[in-house]
Amino acid sequence: MQSTSKPISYAIALENVGGEKVHQHVGHEPSGKSFNAIQLNPKGLPHNPLINSGAIMMASLIRPDLHESNRFSYVTKFWQKLAGGKRITYDNTIFLSERNTADTNYALAYLMKSKGAFPGNSKIDLKETLEFYFQCCSL
């Protein structure tokens, strides 16, 4: 699903923590830039949840209380509900490709961390957050 997973991750985050919390960490305006531009809005947040930086932020908001594998199961079950109960599969080739070409996404994550954009910023595990984001893109 790659980038088409972004609206679903946004929906999951909205369901989990609500719009007010989500929009404390991501804007809702178009950036006018490419999806992976290394740029934040004037408040130091991603412009919206449908660009890479915003989708990474959504990944940080989805059930951070759960262990990594349980977080991914939670997202997979959400997708399964949306698909009318049909089995949702994971593509490890896409995951590895996303992870192996992640320099821009790491740059975005570090920029957001430097601006204090993440919830619990000092405790954020960027590697774990990014790998979860890559997993979500690999459904």
Image: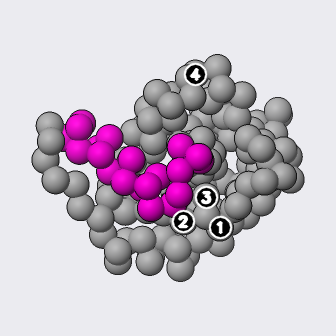
User: Number of numbered discs present?
Assistant: 4
In the rendered structure, are the residues bearing label 4 and label 1 in contact, judged by CB atoms less than 8 Å apart?
no
Magenta run includes residue 81: yes
Residue 47 visible (yes or no): yes
Task: Tell me the distance, in whole angstroms, between the alpha carbons under discs 4 and 1.
Answer: 25 Å
89 lies left or right of 3: left
Task: Tell me which amino acid carries mark 1.
Answer: Lys
Residue 70 sits in which quadrant?
bottom left
In the rendered structure, are the residues bearing label 1 and label 3 in contact, judged by CB atoms less than 8 Å apart?
yes
In the rendered structure, are the residues bearing label 3 and label 2 in contact, judged by CB atoms less than 8 Å apart?
yes
In the rendered structure, are the residues bearing label 1 and label 2 in contact, judged by CB atoms less than 8 Å apart?
yes
126 lies left or right of 54: right
Q: Residues within 10 Å of mark 1 (few under 14, many from 20)?
A: few
139 lies left or right of 53: left
Element at label 1: helix
Q: Nearer the viewer, residue 92 or 49?
A: 92
Q: Nearer the viewer, residue 72 or 43?
A: 72
The disc at residue 131 is: 2
Residue positioned 22% across, 54% down in the render = 88
Task: Tell me the distance, in whole angstroms, between the alpha carbons under discs 4 and 2.
Answer: 24 Å
Task: Tell me which amino acid carries mark 2.
Answer: Glu
Residue positioned 58% across, 21% down in the render = 19
Q: What range is drawn magenta here?
A: 63-83
Name the residue beneath numbered marker 3: 129
Q: Position of residue 16 (x, y in %)?
A: 50, 31
